[in-house]
Image: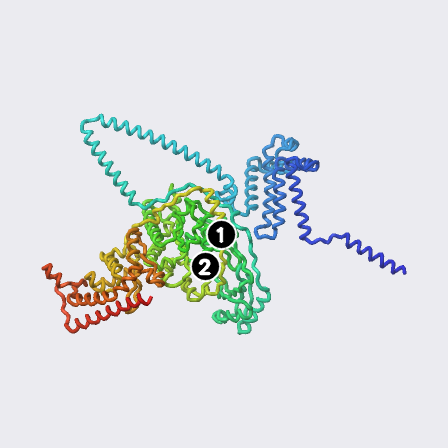
Amino acid sequence: MFNRKKRKYTRHYDRLNAASAFNLSPEVKKSIFIIFLVALGGVSLLSLFSLAGFLGEYVNSGLIALFGWGRIIFPALILGFAFLLYNEAKEWVHGYIYVGLFFFLLSFQSLLHIFFQANPEAAVTAGKGGGYVGLFLAKIFVSVIGFWASLLVLFCLLAISLVLIFDTSISGIFGESGFFGRLFAPFYWLFNKMRGRQSAGEEGEEDEGMEELIAEEEMEFSENKEGADFNSHKVAEANGTLRQLELAREEERPTRLSRSNIRINLPLDLLSDKVGRPSGADIKISNEVIKRTLENFGIPVEMGEISVGPTVTQYTFKPAEGIKLTRITTLSNDLALALATHPIRIEAPIPGKSLVGVEVPNRVIARVGLREILDTREFRERKYNTMISLGKDVAGQAWLANLAKMPHLLVAGATGSGKSVCLNSIIVSLLYQNNPDDLKFILVDPKRVEFPVYNGIPYLLTPVITDVPKTINALKWCLNEMDRRFDVLAAAGKRNIDSYNATAKERMPAIIFIIDELADLMVTAARDVEGAIIRLSQMARAVGIHLILATQRPSVDVITGLIKANIPARIAFAVSSSIDSRTILDSQGAEKLLGRGDMLFVTAELSKPKRIQGAYVDDHEIKRIINYIKDQAGEVEYNEQITGRQKVGGIAGTGFNDGDGDDLYEEAKEIVINSGKASTSFLQRRLRVGYARAARLIDLLEEGGIVGPGNGAKAREILISKEQYAKVAEIGTAGAPLHNRAESRFNVEEVLGESSYAEASEDKEETQKEIEEDSEEFEESENEDEEGNIIDENLEIDAEEELPPVAEEEEPLKHERIKTLKQKNQESEDEETEKLYSR
């Protein structure tokens, strides 16, 4: 009985102990401590303004005694400490930030009290200086190393604490783009503006003094000897001639870039701070599956480290000695079957390591925001302002590349794989690094949907270009600007734009020429566009002109061999076949990418393509940035001459002025368009030239978009009507193709025009008669001289001139050749007419 009661009371006692004990988890304790710090910081802040009641007076008195004037920063330190504890799990929170806060408090309090050396105790009593904390530390420093050395050491400790707190370099804090640099930027701008006005006033006074001095000298000179009038007339004439020569030279020079003197510091708050987290399969299980699958095929391996990236998880292993890598790379489909995922990419070997990597796609792809890349130490401590943000690799490391070192970039991939987002992230990352006077863009967007949002910012040289003729003119302007810059560098004795800007009073801005869809330009004006791109890619690096070309059609007629040879830096997004991957990268791999920004990046320095998940920037972020720039810059003026008619010296292989090399090109163009017929023999008859020259004219007409490509024995298609040609001739656009070949396949009536189409239908019989008459004329006089020009015997008789002797042909061969030519002309004209009626 007694034992039963004892057990009962013991049970009640254990329950009471369990209820009274606080078995809190570490997270709960941490949360309570954070809330306590927030309350303490808030009460101390309110006590500074006498808003915390009776308790606040005691808190304020204690802070005055301990910290003196430093009580002002105490609430900020406490709240900052609470903020760091709350975000302790994030990557940017490190232990040395707490150390920086501690050193900042000590050095700041010491500096506040070190100046009260006459009576430091009285300063504490009066609530001045750094309180008891500053009094204690200042006494130690002054007694050990003296006043001036203490002052220097305390300032250095304060700077070190700021470097630790902000996790950056000295230039990142005190530089132009740093915290204090941005804080005092308005004062610097005001000071420079006042200084510029003062210097302008001094120059104006000097100019006035020089004018007065010149006027006095002219008066003295006019009062001199009698022969002075004759000499003064000579000097005036010479000065006028020199002035005319200077004006003529200025007109011949390319348009110089105007300077806006606008400074824009974009805050990172304009970009979204959302951080995506990848979600993959069980890492341990996948690791075992890979090892077991390889062992089943007789490949023993030793598993290595595992890297979880935003898009894929990379499993590494080291094969046994004597195993060929080709045996491993052929097992990608078997590994995909074992892991129940697709596609799998095998990197054998990993550059710089004696390991093989298997990249398995994550179930959930993490979004890599542009702010994540721009808020890294690599970006803040950059040495150049032409760094472009690419994204994160398979290990989660941020990747940046220097565009000036590439110096050009080719971007290609299938539709919807992430090309336009990549171009936008490149543009935005460059905007964050440069002012409008240091960087200029020329944007070409044939699709008219991606780049027009950038219109109105001072970084553009000209509004966004959307049509082909203006694009060709802009390329020609770049060629002229490149030549002008080379002349300036040669006159200054500099090798490149960096060395010139280091010493020049007026800096040369870098020019980035971005084309969003290269295929549209190559289809309509391949010769002009390719020639300009090749020349710029070969020579424009030294003068700060860079090309970024993007296309969604990675074929050899768009990405030609010459373009690839001069642009080694390339980005390949997801493509449909390994052939497209080889066209872009000269290697396979892009066909196994996942899309949505998954890319392979290769440069001349990388031995193998690097897999990167591209940085993402959405439309709302771009609009916020553009609106911020417009608010800072105000109204801007663009240079309309860039897209106007340009003159470029004819250079072999560039496509410019090739048509002007033949005097008969324009005449041949008019004949073909007005007659509706295009063939080598037809031009031979009408222009009285030889076969070689007529064939060259046909080639030039094809390159100029006048006629379609040859199709065996069928007649060439005329791609422009008389009305269209008349309009183009009135506009006179330089370098503009007269017709888009892609449109000629749909409606012949639209291409030729209703009148031409009707005439072709009505004049079918007349066309047959013309062919017979032309053939008879050709039969009567068909001799050629050594240069290939046809000699008309009737014209020779009328002119009564002797022409060069011509080798006579044998009569059977001559009649046989005429008969064959006549038959070919008959067939081509019949097929052309039949083609018109069938369509």
**Mark 2 or mark 1: which is in front?**
1
Give percent across and percent down for residue 701.
28, 60
Can you identify the residue that label 2 sits on? Answer: 601
Give residue 131's mark.
Answer: none
Q: Element type at marker 2?
A: strand
- Mark 1 neighbour density, 10 Å: few (under 14) some (14–19) many (20 or more): few
Give residue 619's mark.
Answer: 1
- Mark 2 neighbour density, 10 Å: few (under 14) some (14–19) many (20 or more): some
Q: Quadrant of the N terminus?
A: bottom right
Q: Element type at marker 1?
A: helix
**Residue closer to the observer: 664 or 235:** 664
Where residue 133 sits, quadrant-wise, is top right
Point 66% across, 45% down: residue? 37
Left or right of residue 751: residue 161: right
Give percent across and percent down for residue 749.
33, 61
Q: Are marks 2 and 1 in contact (CB under 8 Å)?
A: no
Left or right of residue 46: residue 257: left
Residue type marked 2 = Phe
Point 62% across, 49% down: residue? 86
